[in-house]
Image (cartoon, helix red, strand yellow):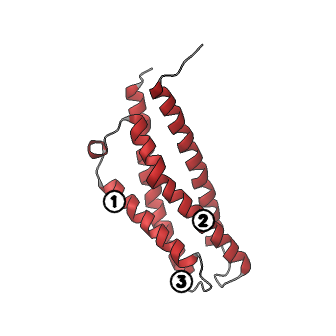
Amino acid sequence: MHFKTERQKSWTDTDTIIDNWLQERQALLVIFTQLCQSKSFLYSAHLKSKLDQFCQLLVDYVSAGQFEVFEKIFEASKLDRSQSFDKQVFVNILRSTLFALDFNDRYAKAERYDTLEQDLSKLGEHFARRLELEDYIIDLYVEALRQLNPS
């Protein structure tokens, strides 16, 4: 029989949370790409449906990152935020979270999309930077696990 230590169980749970979150990220990027490729940004039932789906997934994704994934990463890997990396990482992630929530507030109930194309472009810029930072945090987690459990 093979019994996992509490630490190994924590790593497995965290890995599962990260994997699910990254799958959600992929789904978000697919819908984002579809929205950006819209031929018209005039209000339509189809565009509204796609935008509603996107906004819901966007809020779920950034909230999970902010309040679940990062916490689990730090807990499982024993990383100390203040020593592991510059606080600017979290400041920039928080900025992108706030921009995403603002985007959601603006478009969740909107019936006009006059600035949607420009707002999607700005969101894309924020999101591109955020993805880099998220990947950086995941890389720190992986490296911390290597150091905690050398093979």
**Which element type, helix, strand or loop, lies under badge 3?**
loop
- How crowded pointer 3 is (Cα within 10 Å; few <14, some 14-19, many 20+) is rated as few
Q: Which residue is mark 3?
A: 115
In terms of secondary structure, where does tag 1 sit? Answer: helix
Please report the residue visible at 52 percent of the width from the left and 78 percent of the height from the top: 106
Q: Which residue appears at 67% of the width and 81% of the height? A: 40
Check disc 2: other Cα within 10 Å, few if <14, some if 14-19, many if 20+: few
* Quadrant in which residue 144 is drawn: top left
Foreground of the two, 44 or 9:
9
Outermost residue, front direction?
A: 6
- Camera-nearest residue between 28 and 56: 56
Decide: is 88 above or below 43.
above
Residue 149, compared with residue 62, is above or below; it is above
Quadrant containing the C terminus in the rendered view: top left
**What residue does disc 1 label?**
91
Which residue is drawn at the image coordinates 65% and 67% (left, top)? 53
Q: Is residue 50 left or right of residue 18?
A: right
Q: Earlier in the sequence, mark 2 or mark 3?
A: 2
Residue farthest to the left, as pictured = 83
Q: Do the residues bearing badges 3 and 1 touch, measured as CB atoms within 8 Å?
A: no
SS class of the residue under badge 2? helix
Residue 119 position within the rendered picture, expressed as x and y whole percent measured from the top left: 51, 76
